[in-house]
Structures are given as structure tokens and as C-alpha cells.
Image: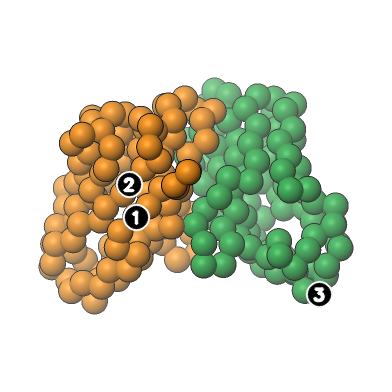
Chain colours: A orange, B green
């Protein structure tokens, strides 16, 4: 079946602009995660949804970052007033349930470049 | 806090050599442990996992054993191939749903 998809694959924006990154999880997966991967580093957790609600947003770096999942499927990560330090690959993952043993399946990522 | 430490790369090997990539962790409770792999130009893929002490995860000739006494989850393969060249990430999940990753180890295998 189809895996996790993310759009766009690349996004170039100017400092101060607003961007939205979209994630389509695997059909039927109730849990959805966003991570950020900087160059040469491992992914870092941003936010986790169980259904429509954000169960843990402790990884969001500041209030410029916000994510939604209104119907419990597609999610959008929103970044306001982008800064050069926001440049990274943003990864989305989904899992069937929220158990700690459950495999998280990752999408290909969106590479965000803030000029 | 929870953390994962991996050996620094790159690890450079000739084809058919034995591979070990070290991974140690610090965690509260009893985490599940994972190895993910990122091939050039591709997304993260689960390679193997182990959910309790002494479990061995295996896939595609790779193995890792969950060692609670040494808090380790070292990745091994008996004979690497050029196609194994990738970045390997060790990760843990303590039950709070978020994966904690190491910084990754790049493996380069030459013919």
C-alpha cells in the first residue's frame, strides 16, 4: 500500500514568510508524528497526534510553530515568520497505534530552506 | 533525560567485511530500541527493532541484541555489501510515543 507522503518535497522561502508543510499518513494509522532533521543530525521530535488532538507538542521550538490534524488523517505543520535557523528537513511519520513498540513509518521529508 | 549515543562515522569497509556500529542509550524505564537506515536520496526506513531485554532484532542480514546490563544495542552484519552504504540511526522509545535518535553513523562500503 501507499506509504507516508509529504508535500512539497522542497520549499524555499524568504526570512519572515509563512510556510505550510503537509503530511498524508498511511491509511488507518491513528498516530502521526513530526520530526525535524538538521544537517548531520538525527531527527528531533516536534509534535505527536493521536487522532485529531496533539497529545504531545513538547518538541515545538517556539510559538512560531503550530500543527493541526483536523480530521484525524492529513496533518499540516505551519511555521510563521520563518528564520534562517528553521532550515532543515521536516519529517512526518505515522504508526498504527500509539504503543511504544509500534513501528513509526517515515515519509520522504520536506526540505525547507529559508533564505 | 533519554538519549542515544552512536559511534561517529564514517565507517569505511571493504565488501564482505564484518560490520559493527555501536549504540548505547540512557533511558528511564524500559525502552524499545530501533535501528533505522537512510539510503542516499531516500527516507528513513526501519531496519530492525527489539522491545525487551535480551531480544534480538534481525533483518537483511543485520542483527542487534538488546543488552540491558550494558545499555547497548550494537548493530552487526557478517558480510557487508556495497548496497549497504547508508546512514544508520539508533533510536529509542520510552513509551511516551516519541523516538529519540542518535546522530547517525555513515557507512561506506567499497567494492
Residue ID at (27%, 68%): A11
- Circle 3 Cα neighbour tier, 10 Å, few/some/many (<14 / 14–19 / ≥20): few
Q: In the rendered structure, the residue with mark 2 lies on which chain?
A: A
* Residue at mark 1: chain: A
On the image, the x and y values in percent for residue A33 come to 36, 41
Residue B33 disc label: none
Determine whether A14 is above or below B35 in the image. below
Query: Looking at the image, which is closer to me, A112 or A23?
Result: A23
- Picture layout, residue B109 above or below residue B1: below
Closer to the observer: label 3 or label 1?
1
Q: CA distance from mark 1 to mark 2?
A: 6 Å
Q: Rounded to the nearest whole Å, what is the CA distance between mark 2 and mark 3?
A: 39 Å
Q: Could you say whether the residue bearing mark 2 is in a helix, strand or loop?
A: strand
| Numbered disc 3: secondary structure | loop
Quarter holding the C terminus of chain B is bottom right
- Residue under label 3: B111
What residue did someone put label 1 on?
A6
Please name the residue shown 48% across and 43% down the image.
Answer: A1
Contact between labelled residues 2 and 1, with CB atoms less than 8 Å apart = yes
* Residue bearing mark 2: A24
Q: Is residue B28 above or below residue B26?
A: above
Q: State the residue in front, A67 or B100.
A: A67
Mark 2 crowdedness (10 Å alpha carbons): few <14, some 14-19, many ≥20: many
Residue count near mark 1 (Cα–Cα under 10 Å), binned few <14, some 14–19, many ≥20: many
Amino acid at each position: 500500500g501507499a506509504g507516508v507522503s509529504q508535500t512539497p518535497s522542497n520549499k524555499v522561502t524568504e526570512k519572515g514568510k509563512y510556510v505550510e508543510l503537509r503530511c498524508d499518513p498511511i491509511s488507518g494509522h491513528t498516530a502521526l508524528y513530526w520530526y525535524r532533521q538538521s544537517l548531520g543530525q538525527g531527527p528531533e521530535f516536534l509534535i505527536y497526534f493521536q487522532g485529531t488532538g496533539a497529545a504531545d507538542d513538547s518538541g515545538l521550538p517556539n510559538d512560531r510553530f503550530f500543527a493541526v490534524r483536523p480530521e484525524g488523517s492529513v496533518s499540516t505543520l505551519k511555521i510563521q515568520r520563518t528564520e534562517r535557523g528553521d532550515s532543515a528537513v521536516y519529517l512526518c511519520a505515522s504508526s498504527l497505534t500509539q504503543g511504544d513498540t509500534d513501528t513509526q513509518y517515515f515519509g520522504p521529508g520536506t526540505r525547507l530552506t529559508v533564505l | 533525560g533519554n538519549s542515544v549515543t552512536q559511534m561517529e562515522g564514517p565507517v569505511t569497509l571493504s565488501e564482505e567485511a564484518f560490520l559493527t556500529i555501536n549504540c548505547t542509550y540512557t533511558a528511564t524505564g524500559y525502552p524499545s530500541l530501533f535501528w533505522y537506515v537512510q539510503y542516499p536520496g531516500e527516507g528513513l526506513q526501519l531496519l530492525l527493532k527489539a522491545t525487551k531485554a535480551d531480544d534480538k532484532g534481525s533483518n537483511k542480514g543485520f542483527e542487534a541484541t538488546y543488552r540491558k546490563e550494558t545499555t547497548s544495542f550494537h548493530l552487526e552484519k557478517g558480510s557487508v555489501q556495497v548496497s549497504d552504504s547508508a546512514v544508520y540511526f539508533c533510536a529509542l522509545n520510552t513509551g511516551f510515543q516519541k523516538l529519540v535518535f542518535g546522530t547517525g553513523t555513515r557507512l561506506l562500503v567499497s567494492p
